[in-house]
Structure formats: C-alpha cells, structure tokens
Amino acid sequence: MSDMITLTIDGKTVEAKDGESILNVARANNVFVPAVCYLTRCSPTLACRLCLVEADGKQVYGCNTKVKAGMDISTTTPNIAIERRAIMEVYDVNHPLQCGVCDQSGECELQNYSLYMKVDSQSYSIKDIHRPTQHWGVMNYDPALCIVCERCVTVCQDMVGSNALSTVKRPSDAIDATFKSEMPKDAYAMWNKLNKSLIGYDADACTNCGECISACPVGALVSHDFQYTSNAWELKKIPAANPHSSDCAFLYYDIKHESIDNHATKKIYRVNSEPHYSTVNGAGRFAYDFENKVSSKDKVAFKKAVEAFKNAKNIKFNSYITNEEALILQEIASKTGAKLVNEDARRYQEFLNNYSKTSGKSLYSSTLADVHSSNFVISVGGYLKSDLPNARYAFNNSVIMNKGAGLYFHPVADPIMEKIGKKGKTTEFIYHAPLAEEAILYFILYKFGKELPAQVQEYIDSFKQTKTKTVVEEVKETVVEIVKDEATGEEKEVKKVVTNKVSKEVEFEYSTLVELFGKDEKFLDLLEEMLAKKDKFSLIVAEDLITHPNSVNLAKLCGLIDRCTAFDVVIIPSQTNTLGVAQICTLSKEVEGFSVGYNMKADFELSALGDGNLDIPALNQQEGTFTNIDKKVIPTNAALEFKGYTLNEVANEVLGTDVEYTIEYTAKLPTQKGYKSEQFDDLPNKFGNDQVEYRGYDLQSFEVLIQDDFKPIIDERITLQDDELIIYRANPINQFNEFTAIAHEFKDKLQDGIFFSKSLFEKLELNEGDKVKVIANNQELILSAYIDIQIEGNIPYISTFMKNSSSNALFNTYRFNKAKVVKA
C-alpha cells in the first residue's frame, strides 16, 4: 500500500495516498473541481481541461497530476476561471438547443457546468457540419450532441475492455486563425480537437453492456428503448442490485407511472448506474422488465401451495433468490423434513468446503475489488465474458490501469478477452484442452508455491526435469586498434568497445506441467518478464473447476494456492445468490417423492414467470439481500408492486408464524455463517466520494482446521472420434437465465441453441437458419445453429438459459463433453 502524505487544498490540510491524482484527492475530501472527461476509475484523457488547478504556483491538470507531500493546491485562480469559462463556451458552440426534448436534460453535465460557470453569452463561432445520428447495437449515437469528452471511449477501454469505441476524424471547417491568439490557450486546444473528432464504433467488439451510455455526460449516447419516453426529472430512482449475476452491482431502477391514463401502475423505464464507482453488465442494464404481473391473489392456489410444502419430499430451487427467501426455504425444510435441492449451490458449497480444508478459512480470500487493484491476475476455468462480465472488467482494469499482467486459461478462444492484451501487451491467453485445469493449478503451485505439503511437493517434483538450452549472450569487450591520422600520417592507439555474440549451454529447471496445457519452455521465459515488478496477485477460478470430475482435488489445490502462494483467490458464484444459498441452506441431492419447485419444474411449482401453480414475485418486485461475489451482504429494493402472494405468506401457514414482511428475516440470517443481526432498513447502500463502497456489510470468515489430503491428478483428456466435437455449456453474452430471456430488449433477439465460430460454421457447411442434430450423453437434440463472431476455434457452446432447458441433458456435471454434430 502506498504511504500516506499530507498536503493542502484551498487552505485545507488533507491526507492522501502518495501518487494519487489531485482530482481524486479533492473528490475524496469533498473539494469540488469541475471535470467532464474524467471518470474516477479510468485513465485521464485531458479532453475537457476543466480540472485545471494551481499546484505549488504552477497551473496543472488535476486528473493526471500526482500529489506530493507538502503540495499546496488552489482549485481556482482568476486565470483558471477565465479558462474554464472559455472551455464551456466552446462546448456550447453549435450544440443543439434541444434541451426540452433531450433525454439527458435535467441530469446533463453540460447544462450543469454552463449554469455553474454562468455562461450567458457566446464569444466563439464556427460553421457546423451535418453529423447524422447512428444506431449502435442497444443504443443510438447523436454526434451533434457529442462533446467528444471521450468518457465512453475510456470506460470501454479501461473498465470494460472491449475497445469497441474510439475517437475518429470528422470533416470540419478550420477554426478561424484569429481565435488562436485571442482565446485562452487550453480552451483553444480543446476546441481544436473537438472540431476534428467524433466517436467511432466497432460492432464486432461491442458486448452491448451499455456502460458508455451511463458514462455519457450529455445526450449523445442513449438506450434506443428509452429515448423520448420520459423526462429524467419525472423518474423516481429505486436503489437496487443487479439481479442476474453474482456481482450484484449497484444500480437504480428508474420508474414512473405507466401512462397518463394509468397513474396507479408503475413501470421501469430504464436502469441507471454510477459509472464513477460501479459497472453494470448488459443484463443488469437492459433486462429489467421481467416482473410478474398479477392482478390479484389466488386464494385457491395459495392453499394448494401450503399443502404442497407440507407434503413435499423435495424443495427444488435455483439461486436467483434473496438471502431471505433462502432462509425461509431452509426453515420450511427443517420443519417438514423435506430435502432442499439446488445443484448449482450444492456443488459450490462442496467446492468451498473442500477449499477451506486447505486454505484454513471458511471463505475465499479475494474479491473483484481486490482484482481491480492487483497487478498480476490469473483466470482459470471461467468463460468470463459471459459467466461474469464484471470479472472480465476487473481483469482488464488490473492489466490496463495498474500496468499489470495476466494469464487467461480456457479452452474456448475468445477475441474479446484478447482485446485486453492488445492494449496492455502483457496478457497471455492459453487455450488448453478440457480437463487440463488441474494441471494448471499444479503449475501455479510449482511456480509460486512455498512450504507446500510433502504430498504435493513430491508430486510436483515428479514433473520437474533438468534440461539444457543454448543461450546467445552479448559480451562487450574493449579492444585497442591502431588508427592512422590521414592528415599527419601518424599512427595512434584507439580504444573501442566491441559487442560479440557468444553461445553457451545453460541448465534450467523445466516442468512438463507446462506441456499439459499446450506451452513449452518459452512460456516460462515470457512469464518471468511478465512478473517483473509485480507485487499484488489475484487468482480467479470459476464453474469449469466446480463442475470438474475431480473438483474435490481442484478445490483443495485452490485452497493451497491461497495458503502457500502470494495469490488471493476469488471463486465466482455462477448465479446471483449462489454464495448466499450455499451459506444459508443445508443442501441435498433429490430423493424420490413429491416435489415442490420454486422457479423450478416440479410436481407443484411456484413461479415468478407466471407459468406455475402459484405466482410469486420476481426479483425486481422484492426487498431483500444478496450475498455477492465480494462476500458482501447487499440490499436490493422493490421497483414494482406485486399483487400476489409471497413465500413469506406461505411460510406463515406452514411454520405457524406471523411475519408481516419478508425483510424481517434479514436480521435472522445465520450468524454462525458470518451474517450479522442487522435490520434491512439499517443497511447502507451508497458509494462515497472517497471511492469506498458503503453497501450492506462484509460476510465474516472463520478459521477452519487444515486437512491436507490430495488425490493424484487426472491425466485423462476427452478423446474424439473423427466425427466428434467438444461442446461447452455456456450462454450468449447478456443471457443469464429465464428472466433475461423474457426482457423486451432480448426477447425479440432470443437465440437459444448451439453457437459456432465463423470458421467452424463454414467448415461444417452450415448456413444461417440451419438446425443441427447434437448427439451426446446418450441424448439426441435438434438445436438451432448460430455464428458467434466473438469466439474462435473448434469448440461450439450450447445455451441453457431457458427455464428447464433440455440442453442440460447433453452434459454430465462437467461443462465440456464430446458430441456428434450433424446438419438436421
């Protein structure tokens, strides 16, 4: 951690981290410095130049100037005020006067700063050039409104890692030469760049996350489904958490009445976020309208639901539920003796328990926030782009913002992930064979482990060999040459340094573990270069490991990496509240007998989709908490009303209790599992200017007795016949579950089937609209075939986001399998 220093801002003594930017230090201490182009977690662009300050008597830019001990900073001077005023006038040159219909009006930073700096006249002018609007994926871009602050570009590059946006040249008239001498220097430089630039879009790289929309300070980028539907000031913001993935990122549901004729019914018009502090993936931003619309309570169905729970042998559910719902299901099961069945959470629970046996801690050690601040990251067993986009963002942020390095291990080639390395040039992508994940973990222990258990050390030693290789070194020698002076004819001695190349044989320690995932000894040399000056290490592991045939051993190896290396480890929960369910519930495998399903197919089903025996609320209609990947208990609020029954009401009948609101269970979450006895309404839910997340509370971790017991590595690989392929269980970007599938933004674009790289699609002689027969795991399915331009290689993936997807039958536990794929 950087040392703390003391400095002065506007006469106020403050503390800061040495090397932090002036702008961030000012913000953390509630000192206002205007800035349009800078986002707190991204690199500075110097596009707006409004953050001018005076530091130790010198005018500098607050976004890219680092603080020093004893520095004396003034945030405004007469000259700076003149510059800022001129900059705002330039931004207003030819900016369309359409605030009354602009979607950003009321929360527009151009409006705010123009008023703040009292811009009431215009000193500059230039002929405008027609800039037509463009439709980009889920959004519309209006270049006439764009002020080219580059926030969209920097958030796409520095946070998201897609590199889908960039500044491009545009035709324009030249600025009148007289302005250069007449106007302030920084204002002219800013105008000169603004006059020549627009934002360009690469559709093939875009993942439709919409983060650029959130980052845009004006109305240039807007979601096409929100444009011209509401004024910003009419909307009520409901603070909530992303219900679709385990980052549970902070977001707002922006709601108001459905129509002029229907004021009683509220509707979500969009999802908004805080781009300075939190990144929301595309599912969280656009799949918001999945509520269960119920007109009244069905008393007959309710009575049947109560009886069903009383008679159930199994209660089947997924992890798209709140902690409170999980606790209610646990109490019902304890009362009735039913088995709680949730395979997603049960596998995660088992993996975490085995991890704890070697790590000595009940929870994994890292968080996505830690990954963001790391400078060396390894990802194993996660298809990050789709499994958890915010984990990809964290990986990217580590490499780009921290000048870090990383290793990404996965069998599916991913050009979107590779864009991280394209800019950072320090990321290696290793596309290995399935089932090599175990070898990769042993390699990490081999390379980074210290004081390993004897059983593991002996096993690793069996993979080591001493080899020799020829190394060419440059050797500098000083030689003396006799040189004749052409003018006098005299000879004299001249010393020269000569560089000679010398070859020699050197011995080195080499691990055949490297060969197991498709690399050779050159990879070890590259790794040494990548590790230079790295001091904060993170390991991301995910579902491929949790579902692996030897997952018990993999979990123990991950725990050992936590204990015996410098890596902190984060284990990605595959669904929104997988970690919470794994902590709260006693989970079992299904037994024979009558089953109740909670958003799962069963003999009696409670469903938030309206397709079961009793309707229940969707997650955007509930108050409650999630336990997210960062091991924080995060509150979420109901955006929309639900007029039917809740699980809490069913539980009152089954348990004989009288609990009025589901959130009364928040304070009852199990303290022996690290939860606190805190009321829901007492949980904080905000970010501070100091970049600290004040949301909920941290789940407590406990010490666990270490039990080192490891199984040998599985050296098997998936062997293929000539007519077979490896298939992978995964989902398209932004499709997480049956709820994202019914949201209007994705419903009309619904694609469920098998997805090929373009090259494999052509190799199999498939055409758009074809269906294929997939034969695997003694099952035969007909699936629609699609091209995914954002994958490469010979492994297609098969989606399972639809409720009770039949495609799951093509796989065992492991996400990979072999299959025959032929045109239907």
Image (cartoon, rainbow, N blue to C red):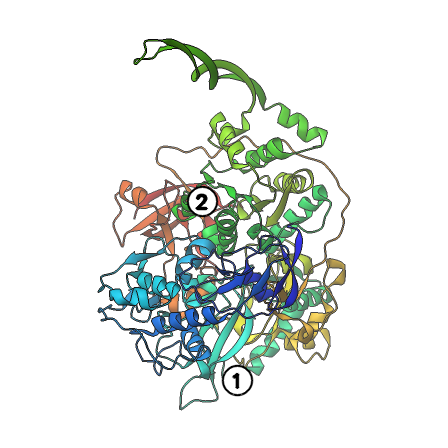
Q: Secondary structure at mark 1?
A: loop
> How far from the left and from the top, in percent, is residue 162?
40, 53
> How far from the left and from the top, in percent, is residue 20?
57, 55
First in residue order: circle 1 vs circle 2 = 1
Residue wearing tag 1:
296
Residue drawn at 73 percent across, 69 percent down: 668
Residue wearing tag 2:
424
Q: Nearer the viewer, residue 20 or 588?
A: 20
Q: Which numbered tag is attached to residue 568?
A: none
Q: Are marks 1 and 2 in contact (CB under 8 Å)?
A: no
Q: Nearer the viewer, mark 1 or mark 2?
A: 2
Q: Secondary structure at mark 2?
A: helix
Cα separation, mark 1 vs mark 2, equals 56 Å
Residue 297's quadrant in the figure? bottom right
Question: Residue lying furthest front in this view?
Answer: 488
Report crowding for label 2: few under 14, some 14 to 19, many 20 or more residues within 10 A (C-alpha).
some
Relative height, residue 410 to residue 310 (above, below): above
> How far from the left and from the top, in percent, is residue 4?
67, 54
Q: Amino acid at mark 2?
A: Gly
Residue drawn at 40 percent across, 91 percent down: 261
- Whether residue 10 is visible to the viewer of this picture, yes or no, is yes
> How far from the left and from the top, in percent, is residue 693?
61, 64
- Whether residue 601 is visible to the viewer of this picture, yes or no, is no
Relative height, residue 464 to residue 761 (above, below): above
Q: Amino acid at mark 1?
A: Ser
Relative height, residue 256 to residue 248 (above, below): below
Question: Residue lying furthest bottom in this view?
Answer: 261
Q: Nearer the viewer, residue 103 or 600?
A: 103
Relative height, residue 276 to residue 510 (above, below): below
